[in-house]
Amino acid sequence: MATIGFIDYYLDEWHADNLPGWIAEATNDGMQVKFAYGLIDSPHGLSNAEWCRKHGIELLDSIEEVVERSDYLAVLSPDHPEFHERLAALPLQSAKPTFVDKTFAPDRAAAIRLFDAASRSGTPLFSSSALRFASEYTDELNRSGGRRIDTLCSQGPGQFGNYAIHQIEPIVSIMGADARRVQFIGTERTPALVIEYSDGRRATMHHLEGSPFRLTYQYEEGVALQATAEADFFAPFVRSLVRFFQTGQSPVDPAETIAVITIIEYARKAAASPGMWLELPS
């Protein structure tokens, strides 16, 4: 039976609560989350020991123990990416398939360092927002017949700090990793962004309170089609995660993950000068 080890900033959080059950449902080979470590106890919920007792998972005393005893590794801390380098340092030396939760890194430089560390040790590394795998988004692409998108319009809920990735990840997966520049066009309450590509294609994203996750595809032929992520997008994401653990093959190109983090970082910078273009590093 293959075992997964969780490494988290603190364990009492939504992703850690739900991933063990979803993984069990997505695999038929007995793969399960067996071990866990949290850097601190939750400041507003269960302690790490209480969380482990609740979920029937063995709490270990160190990241080293989790790495040693697990077949596969998941570095979570979804709302605290500033800890990912610290939490992932040993996993990325292990050569064991390692998933790092969204948001992958706080900035482009850290994202590159994480992939460089994994490359040096031959550690398979995967990170993504679950929205990349939304069936409505992928179905529309499959139906498009290769038509070229002129503009992709994205909208979704949540705060920019921890939810921007859920819009930018699908944009990059559909439009590509070679975005040229960004412009902030929103307000403090309603962040919004234009992403421009070197060939003139554009994507826009808008954080709207209470909005569903939705994409509108404007094709060059003049047809505009809309796709709303209504089905359970975590299910196809977890199936991809399980395949990654089993095969060591990431479903996401590292260049795309770095591009996502780059756009998020430069969007924060662009917010200081709304309406002005900010060039992205190549």
Image (cartoon, rainbow, N blue to C red):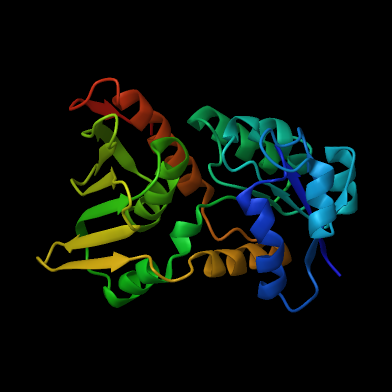
Relative to 74, is 238 above or below?
A: below
Expressed as whole percent of the image width and height from the top left, the position of residue 15 reads 62, 52
On the picture, is 230 further left or further right than 33? left
Residue 161 in view (yes/no): yes
Out of 119 and 98, give the one closest to the viewer: 98
The residue under the point 70% across, 66% down is 21
**Residue 82 picture quarter:** top right
Expressed as whole percent of the image width and height from the top left, the position of residue 225 reads 20, 68
> For the view shown, which residue lies furthest in the left direction?
222
The residue under the point 35% across, 57% down is 213
**Residue 105 picture quarter:** top right
Expressed as whole percent of the image width and height from the top left, the position of residue 178 reads 35, 44
User: How many discs appear?
Assistant: 0
Residue 35 in view (yes/no): no
* Quarter of the figure that contains the C terminus: top left
Relative to 188, is 160 above or below?
A: below
The residue under the point 55% across, 46% down is 102
* Quarter of the figure that contains the N terminus: bottom right
Relative to 52, is 245 above or below?
A: below
Out of 5 and 231, give the one closest to the viewer: 231
Expressed as whole percent of the image width and height from the top left, the position of residue 99 reads 66, 51
On the picture, is 222 further left or further right than 74? left
The residue under the point 50% across, 58% down is 130
